[in-house]
Image (tube, helix red, strand yellow):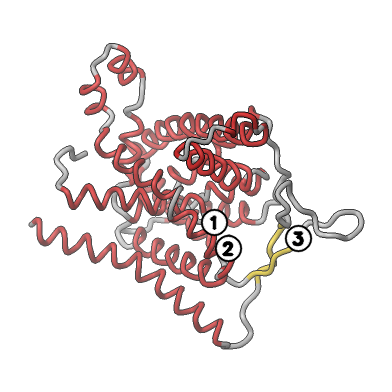
Amino acid sequence: MSSNRNLSDKIWLVLKGLFMGAANKVPGVSGGVVAFVGGFYEEFIYSLQKINRKAFGLLFNGRFKSFFRYINGGFLGLLVLGMIISYFSISKILDYLIVHFELYVWSAFFGMIIGSIYYIAKGFGSWKKKYIGYLLCGIAAGVAISFLEPARENDNLIFVFLCGIIGVSGMTLPGLSGSFILILLGNYVLLLVDSVNALFDTLSEVFMGDFSFFSNDERLQLLKVLIIFSLGSIVGLVSLSHLLGYVLKRYKKATYAVIIGFIAGSLGVVWPWKNKVYSLDSSGLIKTDANGREIISDYIRYFPNDFSRETIIAIIFIIFGMLIVLSLDWYHKLKDNHDG
């Protein structure tokens, strides 16, 4: 872990956090893949591992500089800064793009995941039979998760806390989309759209000197939900990092084989060509949530049967997504040659 980062490295780290935060919000895309491809996955996991009893001892004894150095605070701080910026910028843009250009957004992400599989697999080395077995297990798990039936929305705070623990998995487990897990749990809209928008609106009002949100019970409930979800995410992030750190130290290649398989298995979730299946009530009308949004129960995936203009543009976006990931590989090679 490097504590001597130049300005360029710091800016890149904020940008990586920004992309990681954006990826975590998109169903089917894993922020952990960004960490993996960005070349900072292991440092991310081992830094989170440092948030332990010794770290809290340093913090409670007032040894703040020692605490900051011990947890690799410079690295984690810049990464988290990027994620926070993302939730109030790129995430908002993504929400708009998915509504208006859904096919092209999924195509770009599909291409990025294909590029990620190549990027991670090319440095794996020899594939022994046992590693192929781990790879197939990862693929099977990824495919199985993609076909699970979503649950209904639940704002019970204990359940929200558990959603935080489970949903943060996308940051630590490449290929496992935390957002998609939240869809399966029924709380994606509540936790990553409504509560985040409630915080954004509240901060905007406070900045303008408006504190009327204190009398808005719905807003206060959403803010409470966001706080509990964030606490659950922190608990999940730290606990999962300790487990992964242990596994990476002892079974690194086996872990990487499962991760590659999981990422490959997740391709079905982000397959660009799919039709929405809406939940219907007893009258045959489409169900809506508390905010009037139509509730999607499933997707029907299909292959395009012609090369229309829309299909060709989607294929171009798939290639573009692949090039984005491969460009990171080229950047790292140029950087290594320059440093050498």
Residue at mark 1: 28
Please identify the residue farthest to the front as the structure is shown: 209
**Residue 92 badge:** none
Q: What residue sits 72% from the left and 45% below the top?
A: 151
Q: Which mark is residue 268?
A: 2
- Return the residue found at the far left: 340
Asked if marks 3 and 2 touch (Cβ < 8 Å), the reply is no
Q: Amino acid at mark 3?
A: Tyr
Gap between marks 3 and 2 measured at Cα? 19 Å
Residue type at numbered disc 1? Gly
Identify whether 263 is placed above or below 254.
Answer: below
Quadrant containing the C terminus in the rendered view? bottom left
Q: Which mark is residue 278?
A: 3
Instruction: Residue at 11% x, 61% y: name it.
Output: 337
Under mark 2, the amino acid is Gly
What residue appears at the point 33 percent right and 52 percent down from the top-left corner?
A: 16
